[in-house]
Image: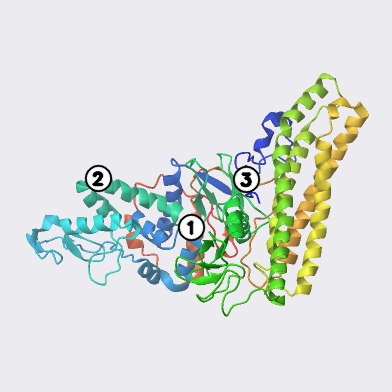
Amino acid sequence: MEDSRGNEEDNYLSDRDSFDGLDNYESDLHLRPSKGSSCKIITKESLLAAQREYLRRVMDLLSLREHHARTLLIYYRWNMEKLFAVLVEKGEAYLFAEAGLTVAGNRDRDPQHPPTVMCNICMEDVPSAEVTKMDCGHSFCNNCWTGHFVVKINEGQSKRIRCMAHKCNAICDESIVRNLVSKMHPDLAEKFDRILLESYIEDNKMVKWCPSTPHCGNAIRVEEDEFCEVQCSCGLQFCFSCLAEAHSPCSCLMWELWTKKCLDETASVKWITVHTKPCPQCHKAVEKNGGCNLVRCICGQRFCWLCGGATGRDHTYTHITGHSCGRYEKDREKKTELAKRYLYRFMHYHSRYKAHMDSFIRESKLVGTLKKMVVNLEKKGSTIREFSWVRNGLYRLLRSRRVLCYSYPFAFMMFGDDLFKDEMTKEEREIKQHLFEDQQQQFEAYVEKLSSFMYEPFDQVAEDKAIQMRMQIINLSVITDNLCRKMYECIEKDLLGSLQFGIHNIAPYHSKGIEKATKLSVCRNPNVTNTHKHQLTNCHTNVATESDRSSHSGSSDKRDCSSRKRARKGKLAVA
């Protein structure tokens, strides 16, 4: 059995990358990029601005300094909705305490210091100028603080370095960490800053690195739903949830199991299956190197080569004492029949999956042929002046072919015993399978019709025939789009929607294809803060604004801006 991915990755083309030769014939209706993409590309240059966009919101809302806002956001994994919900439901004090945040405000920091202070860590008297006090009130010598910070950074705890005092959960001020560490270990200070900066991506479920290899250096941020498929500016299309190749209508778990199943059918695994038997004790693969049917594993267990059953020592070349596997057993025949049925079922779906993937790769190469046909038609002085139908037809064919390709792994998992054995009765499974296969069969038929028309040489036929072919391609493009959407609706509502456990989410269907992420642009909307403060006051009367801390809101970041926020499902949404 071939690996399902085969040479797929070498020949992989995105839906849009296939039309480089037909750019002049882009349709205004189908292929124009959507206005205001909900997926944003975060580059190395815009990462700081993207992070400060979140920081500014928290700073304005709670009148905090930047490092306090970052401590909150890192603890709540940059989830603004969750942070705001905790603030409304349980109040500011609980919000700060959970995150280990102690806000000093304008508290007197003991302006009159004794000449020397004893450090409770190293138990030495040190000058007051070499002692640092955190917001929590604990003070130790700079050498002890520096050693503590270095250890935590090397241990990978840069994002939340706690105070050294016993049972103190306060998070240390990042500016103090940076200043003390940079004096003796500038490389570690840079590492500390980098980890804090990349926390916006590493800890944020709505932001992920592009999985391209070699890495393009971009991260993608989605605004609404993490179960989606996106296209990076490097051209890679991938599932945002699992970072695998775009695989809808398969769920991430379905695709993971399918790829594992395909890999299990490789040549090496098949050779092991044919030429070895598992030891009944340690389960290692044992290869027979003699004529005797009583074999011995390296673990010392003896077993029968014919049936795999554990045996004793006494035997001849034809008989093992106390053991007989020549007797016909009906149960064993049933198990063999089930194994064959499972293999044939897998081969049925895999062969169709592979066939449609091969068709997708071949049809991706049609762009050159179609471009020549368009040029020839123009040279002939055809009355057909607009050729967006050629581009739209090829795009719809490739988009539909990919969906059809991945619908077979979906069917294998949906109607097999791997995932939903306990979710559906046999009768329910048959009904759902017939419903899906009817949709799939109808969709497949129109995809093949569209494919045949795209291969027709419309530049070599009469004018009226070319016009007729143009109408056929336009109509088939619309029909395949509608049938593809109906199949997705069937999957989401009739198949997955009726399950008890909603762990199988699939990326929604978009006629325009996988959404192409656009570069992040950060802009300031001054109305956002007032809106959130007004919403906060109405929802919870016990939330304090603590205006006495507003003077510490940080002047260096006032030029940075926060983008528009949207209310989604009654919560605070991150734009």
Image disc number at residue 227 = none
Query: Which residue does the numbered mark 1 point to in the structure image?
Result: 530
- The three-letter amino acid code for the residue at tag 3 is Gly
Q: Position of residue 69 (x, y in %)?
A: 38, 58
Whether residue 253 sits left or right of residue 409 in the image: it is left
Say what amino acid the circle numbered 2 marks. Pro
Q: Nearer the viewer, residue 107 or 391?
A: 391
Q: Earlier in the sequence, mark 3 or mark 1?
A: 3
Q: Is residue 238 above or below residue 473?
A: below
Which residue is labeled 2 in the image?
Answer: 186
Marks 3/2: CA–CA distance: 47 Å
Helix, strand or loop under label 1: helix
Task: Please identify the quarter of the rendering in which residue 466 is found.
Answer: top right
Specify which label sits upstream in the sequence, 3 or 2.
Answer: 3
- Residue at 83% from the left image edge and 39% from the top image edge: 452
| Residue behind mark 3 | 6
Check disc 2 and report its element: helix, strand or loop. Answer: helix
